[in-house]
Amino acid sequence: MTYERRVAESLPRVRDRIAAALARTGRTDDVIILPVTKGHPAAAVRAVAAAGLGRAGENRVQELESKRSELGGLVEWHLIGHLQRNKARRALALSDVIHSLDSVRLADELAREAERAGTTLRVYVQVNVSGEATKGGFEPEEAPAEVARIAGLPGLAVEGLMTMAPFTDDLAVQRKTFAAARSLLEQCAAAAPEIGRGLSMGMSNDYEVAVEEGSTIVRLGTVLLGERST
Ligand SMILES: *Cc1c(COP(=O)(O)O)cnc(C)c1O
């Protein structure tokens, strides 16, 4: 099936579910859909662009680089995967937004590179509210102070927080994680009022709960585009 067909079939259903989740909690604002195109060819990005989604998320610099060299500025490019500091300069050149700002040293490096390039990089600070050792991001206890420091770095514009729930079908666990991220955002905003109020949370298996708990941007791969080949 072509990617156009896949998106034509999946997108209305995803939009309905997001609308229903918003309605359940009385939210009247909108949620951004970030199509996650990692593991799919450039045709997937063309399809989401043709559907008017305007963004694509990639988790590896290499893959982002190859798609971007083919497609240029067709979409706004979001880097959502862990970034090594030695790739900061490349990532900055390739990304419009980085969701996986997960350490102070990476923040310093990206800020330095952004300043050198004369640009401002939009970032989400990744927080580990589920407490899983395998997940990256700042610990909740340290997040408000670190976010305030990061927000003060020239070259970076903090749009909000990003988090991932444990991989589980347990709705209560998902909900607890997302609610914790939302409350952490409030603490961070109290420490650094200039930051954005964005919450990057929710993937294919948990985006409805994430929206109920305040997500402003959901990162959707499988549910929009089907299984990945890589
Ligand atoms: C792959 C990935 C997604 C999308 O995953 P799906 O389950 O396919 O929707 C979202 N966020 C991050 C950080 C990812 O690496």
Image (cartoon, rainbow, N blue to C red):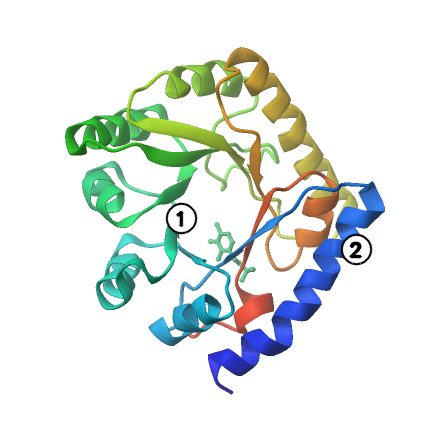
Residue at 62% across, 46% down:
166
Residue 230 seen in this snapshot: no
Query: Quick one: 108 or 229, which is closer to the camera?
Result: 108
Residue at 25% across, 41% down:
92
Query: Quick one: 94 or 229, which is closer to the camera?
Result: 94
The amino acid type found where label 2 is placed reads: Ala
Task: Check disc 2 and report the residue beneath it.
Answer: 20
Residue 153 place in picture, x, y as percent:
32, 19
Position of 44 relative to 77 (above/below): below
State which mark lies toward you, 2 or 1: 2
Secondary structure, mark 2, is helix
Residue at 69% across, 46% down:
211
Position of 38 relative to 126 (above/below): below
Label 1 crowd (10 A; few <14 / some 14-19 / many >=20)? some
Residue 228 seen in this snapshot: yes
Whether label 2 lies within 8 Å of ligand 1 gets the answer no
Residue 82 place in picture, x, y as percent:
37, 44
Query: Counting residues from the N terminus, which is met first, the one under dot 2 or under dot 1?
Result: 2
The amino acid type found where label 1 is placed reads: Gly
Whether label 1 lies within 8 Å of ligand 1 gets the answer yes
Task: Check disc 1 and report the residue beneath it.
Answer: 81
Residue 24 place in picture, x, y as percent:
84, 47
Kindly identify which numbered label has been placed on residue 194: none
